[in-house]
Image (cartoon, rainbow, N blue to C red):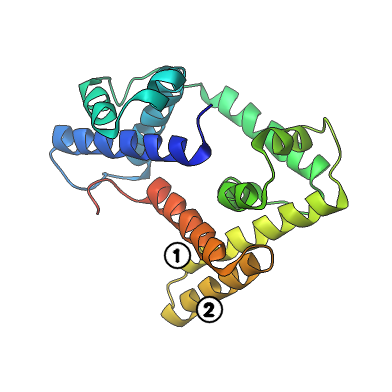
Amino acid sequence: MLKIEELREDFNLFLKIHLEKYRLYANRDEFVDDTEMEIVFNNILYYFIDNILPEKLKLKNLSQAAKREWFNSIEFDYYNYDLPDDEEIDQNLEKTIRLLSSNFPFLPEDSLAVLVFAGPALEAYGLPRDRFMDLLEGKDKCTEIEEHLITWAFNLTALAISSIKEKNKNKRQKYLQEAVAIANEELNEAEAREVVDEIIENYKQLTKNFGES
């Protein structure tokens, strides 16, 4: 089975390669608008989910150089790959929001945008993804410890993201320090900083425009 970190590295490599391919194809270093960015990113993401993820054994056994060669050999239409339709996306989003509200009532209503980046914190603490999904889907109820853990992961992730989005330098530093301090409540100092850095890196990878370093 692929580890979360290995999957993240594989997707980041695939994303980097295909954003660069699109940059060369478009012959420019910026997206025209948010719509273009979303279309291209979603096409790359869903191609990876549909065609790369099923090859788990191949992913696990290939060297980094071989993965790069494989990913580079792939060609697809960045605008017309078969995405879920808007209605299906909306239904899935509404379902997830309902599940969050019903099964994680201790989190804010708008927690989804933060919780999707909380994986490194949950994994570092030791909450398996399968257990988290069982809790989210209501197959079992959170124990008191799990409720504390998910709240802890949410709070430190929210602060880590704020440390990127905030324009004021002093506030950015304050949010970063607070995120590390919360992480330190459950992890040792080195693990705490590593988790916060990984959350920040994941957020940057997802939101940055192509062509940027």
Q: Nearer the viewer, residue 105 or 8?
A: 8
Distance between the Cα atoms at labels 2 and 1? 11 Å
Q: Is residue 43 above or below residue 198?
A: above
Q: Is residue 167 above or below residue 131?
A: below
Label 2 residue SS: helix
In-image side of 73 versus 175 (left or right): left
For residue 131, what is the image quadrant? top right
Query: Which residue is tagged 2?
Result: 174
Q: Is residue 108 visible?
A: no
Badge 2 amino acid: Lys
In-image side of 123 versus 80 (left or right): right
Tell me residue 114's x, y (percent).
Answer: 60, 52
Q: Residue at x 75, y 37 (%)?
A: 136
Q: Nearer the viewer, residue 22 or 72?
A: 72
Badge 1 amino acid: Ile
Q: Residue at x 61, y 47 (%)?
A: 123
Query: Which residue is tagged 1?
Result: 164
Tell me residue 147's x, y (percent).
Answer: 80, 52
User: Count of labels shown?
Assistant: 2
Tell me residue 30's x, y (percent).
Answer: 23, 48
Q: Quadrant of the N terminus?
A: top right
